Image (tube, rainbow, N blue to C red):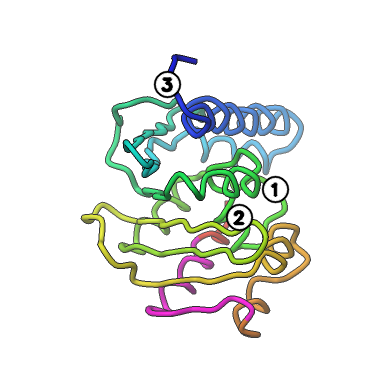
Amino acid sequence: MSEGHTESWTFYRERVPAQFNRTWKAQQAAAAQDEAAARLLESMRTVKATIRVIVHGPDAEEVHNLDVADGCMRAGDASANTPFMTLIHDAASFTPIERESGDSILGFLGALAGMRQDMKLTSQRIQNLSMLDGSLLLELTGENAFSLTAHFGNGRLQSEPRCRLRIDSETYAELRSGALPPQDAFMSGRVEIEGDMQMAMQLAVAALSPD
């Protein structure tokens, strides 16, 4: 690691791609034994996409472009594609995001979908997420509080989110573990929604789209 690189730099440039690629290798192993897994592997292989991460630091801004092609992820300064999703947070939110993500760039989507495992990135899922076309602010409250903006689609980044989701740490943990169904969390009010409620529901549906 070069002098001056931050923990978030190492996380997004090294650890996140490594975790994504471990998931790819695990899918390859499963595909050798199962036809459904082989079909999913082929769907993952056709993905050519970029996720951009912007970290606002006290003195500078980090930009990480995570390119996916042939099932693997590589990180760099430049992007190979127009990002279908841009994640934005400040430096203060990094440590709790790191703690909650499990090295998965898609961890927060998996939590909202009630998934217990890494979300697989497929062309259909990318298409569904891109159609959201706007920004959503996720606020986790409580012990591991953080704030994360997710912008979907190719449009210009918005100064104000279309939708704001506020979730306490206990609810978030139950969603991540699969103990709490997402629809129950939304309907019971354990996930607070401000702004465009339809976007929040569309996000959950997009994340839950079949692999």
Residue located farthest toward the top when viewing the structure as drawn = 2
Q: Is residue 46 left or right of residue 169?
A: left
Q: Which residues are magenta?
A: 190-206
List the residue tagged with mark 3. Answer: 4
List the residue tagged with mark 2. Answer: 110
Residue at 38%, 49% in the rendered image: 85
Q: Is residue 50 left or right of residue 113?
A: left
The answer to whether 80 is drawn above or below residue 140 in the figure is above
Dot placed on the residue nearer the N-terminal end, 3 or 1 = 3
Front of the two marks 3 and 2: 3
Q: Where residue 94 sits in the image (x, y, percent)?
A: 52, 44
Dot placed on the residue nearer the N-terminal end, 1 or 2 = 2
Residues 200 and 101: in front is 101
Residue at 64%, 69% in the rendered image: 168
Secondary structure of residue under mark 1: loop
Disc 2 marks a residue whose amino acid type is Gly
Is 47 in the magenta? no
Disc 1 marks a residue whose amino acid type is Gln
The Cα–Cα distance between marks 3 and 1, rounded to whole angstroms, is: 33 Å
Q: Are marks 1 and 2 in contact (CB under 8 Å)?
A: yes
Q: Where residue 64 sits in the image (x, y, percent)?
A: 38, 33
Residue located farthest toward the bottom when viewing the structure as drawn = 188
List the residue tagged with mark 1. Answer: 117
Q: Are there few (<14), some (14-19), or many (20+) residues within 10 Å of tag 3?
A: few
